[in-house]
Image (tube, grey):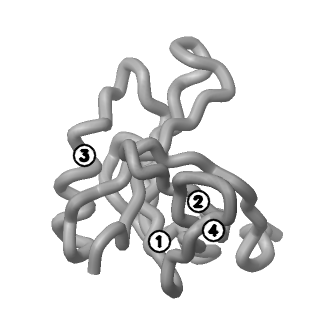
Amino acid sequence: MKNEHIVAIDYSANYKPLTIDYKMLKAENLLDAMNEAEQYMDKETVYLLKIMKRSGAAHKVKGVDAREAAYTDVLTNRGNGWHSTDVAHCEQPWMSQMWMYSNGFVDLYYCEEVRPACTTS
């Protein structure tokens, strides 16, 4: 399936404060997406990577040269390996509406929490 995975690159605060870049991955499965996304992991400049998986079909955005689709966080890497983005790993998954432009640029349009955050007692 084309455009099934996106990597979110969250940079370290001392490198690019409050900056997240999004890159479309060419991988056709999650294992290949993990391998492809790791090229962006630089422990000096990147705080975390998140792989997001498309849920549903993409559709044309009216009046804009872009397509829109929903993506949900599935894996997170904070520089020490991949783990599921779920409550069991104290990670908050998000559903993001992403716009993919014909020139390859990917942009976040809207996001919301998928389920409650991890709580500790």
Mark closest to the chain's N terminus, 3 or 4: 3
Q: Are marks 3 and 2 in contact (CB under 8 Å)?
A: no
Q: Residue at x 28, y 50 (%)?
A: 37
Q: Residue 38 — which label?
A: 3
Q: Amino acid at mark 1?
A: Val
Report helix, strand or loop for mark 4.
loop
Q: Which numbered mark, 2 or 1, is in the foreground of this view? A: 2
Q: Residue 74 — which label?
A: 1
Q: Residue at x 44, y 72 (%)?
A: 53
| 11 or 82: nearer the viewer | 11
CA separation, marks 3 and 2? 21 Å
Total marks shown come to 4
Look at the picture and state if 96 lies above or below 29.
above
CA separation, marks 4 and 1? 7 Å
Mark closest to the chain's N terminus, 4 or 1: 1
Q: Are marks 4 and 1 in contact (CB under 8 Å)?
A: yes
Mark closest to the chain's N terminus, 3 or 2: 3
Q: Amino acid at mark 2?
A: Met
One can see residue 53 in this view: yes
**What residue did someone put label 4 on?**
93
Q: Residue 98 — which label?
A: 2
